Amino acid sequence: IVTKSAAPRKLPPGPKGLHSLRLLLRAALSGTLHLEAEKWSKQYGDLVLIQTPAQNLVFLNSSRLIRRVYAEKGREGVTNDRPKTFSGWWAMYGNNDIILGSPTSTHWARLRKLFHSSIRFYGDGVERFESTVQVELRRLIDRLGAMTTVDSRERTPASVEVDLSNLMSYSLLCVLGVLLTGDCPEPDSDLVHRIKQFDHDANTLFNPSVDGVLTAFPFLRFLPCYYGHVVRDVTSSRQRLLDTLFTEAKASHAPGHPRGIVDILFDEQLKPDGHWLSDQHIQCVIMDTVITAYLTSRETLLDLFLYLLHFPEVMRRIQKEVDHAIGQRMPRIEDRGNLPYTEAAILEVLRHSSFIPLGIPHECRDDVTVDDVHISKGSMLFANTWVCHHDPEVWGDPGIFRPERFLDDVTGQVLPATHPLRQNLLSFGAGKRSCPGENFARTRVFLYVTTLLQKFDILPPAEHELLPLERGSWNSGAMLNLKPYHCVFQERR
Ligand code: HEM
């Protein structure tokens, strides 16, 4: 499958010349690369190449192709590297982490495996994860309950209008704190501020338009310009984050009594064969977890609730399923199998919003041929899930929000991950670098949605405009994120 030959090679089609570079630059700077890439996919097809002076960029525009390139035996060893960018070099101490690290580096595979097992320890049906989330959800319900008021004249149930982004942020940060260190930070604590600040600063640096400029001109970090500020901000917020999550945690670590993932890593370090795991590796895993476990789950939940506000019939159907299968007790992870419609709604939100529209870029370590077309060594690869998830030939009516598409017509169960239609849903990537937090993320979203909808109806705001369900409602970037919005939580009678 991986070939090298002297014969003329068929390159993927794509826009050429200065005009295409201008379009590329404009799209990268405005964070709308996925929208430009969507136009190119319509014009040139499943495989699109843009040659830039720095690197070839290849867009993979169908799920079949993404699977073939990322996951097929023979190619997967070549196509799963990461581009060496400034952000990995600077923020992750020379790409020493999992997300930006190279599979060829000495300890990457071991680190990914260790991370996966610590996440699994918490995420896959283990009581500790479930009870952590349940404790926070009870607190969240109490907080909401304390905020609600009753309009006695109208005789309506108690309700409150909230900024959902704020509400979700703190709640998810609390779960993150418990997972990492065993403690839920106070709403106004230093740790909450430090995590938020680091997330904000890292997100700015990781934005391809900023990262790309710094990769090309790394000396800018020394200058008193925008790019210099970005680098200085990340450096100091990283320091403050690690002072708490690493240095203080290490000082109070009691071997053999893990309070959270960080202690599991400290314990691993103390094993007779644990010397490979350096302090920097652990710091990088902490940063990876903070970036991935908070922002992505927050986005999924905010997206899901916005869809429910626009499609109240979907909310009612989830509530009916919760009432029938769970009743009044607290939802549990094992309930997932009995709530197929809820699971399907979560999948449909991931498909419809596709908030990581171009995945995390890969890099080809060697030349590769796919369907007779040549992709050269060093190319940067983008899995264009935005286009794949909206392909009319695959989904029929991709613009319509329709959870039922993920249900089996006969059994009513969720289509298994091996089903041909499910194979086209690539929100978590494919192959060697696919997301190790998928189950963790989907489980947490399930617990949040079922627990909140069991107690509350989510209604459009009375004092604000309802955020429309249109592209402009998401801020652009490597990860699309919804603009803040309000909604009403009304206690169910
Ligand atoms: C709905 C939520 C999430 C989505 C949509 C998502 C999606 C993704 C995607 C698209 C990738 C890149 C795959 C590739 O390179 O081909 C990725 C990688 C990754 N994700 Fe997630 N993710 C989510 C939640 C999480 C959570 C909760 C965690 C951790 C607890 C996590 C940890 C990671 C890590 C460590 C990687 C890097 C893997 C590697 O480079 O080998 N993710 N994720």
Image: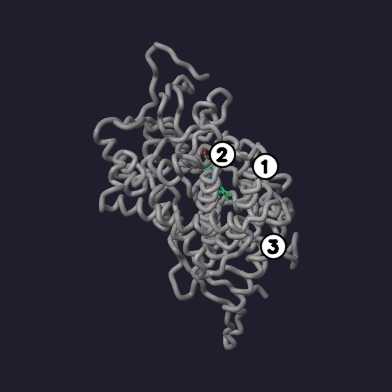
Q: Which residue is mark 1?
A: 271
Using the rendered view, name the quadrant where residue 15 is placed. top left
- Expressed as whole percent of the image width and height from the top left, the position of residue 426 reads 55, 41
Q: Do the residues bearing badges 1 and 3 touch, measured as CB atoms within 8 Å? A: no
Q: Which residue is mark 3?
A: 320
In the image, residue 25 above or below residue 484: above
Label 2 beta carbon within 8 A of ligand 1: yes
* 129 and 118: which is toward the camera: 118
Residue at 31%, 40% in the rendered image: 24
Q: Which residue is mark 2?
A: 434
Label 3 beta carbon within 8 A of ligand 1: no
Side of 131 relative to 70 (left or right): right
Amino acid at circle 1: Lys
Colour setting: one colour
Where does the C terminus fall, quadrant-wise? bottom right
Q: Secondary structure at mark 3?
A: helix
Side of 479 relative to 255 (left or right): left
- Expressed as whole percent of the image width and height from the top left, the position of residue 300 reads 54, 55
* Label 3, residues with CA under 10 Å away: few <14, some 14-19, many ≥20: some
* Label 2, residues with CA under 10 Å away: few <14, some 14-19, many ≥20: some
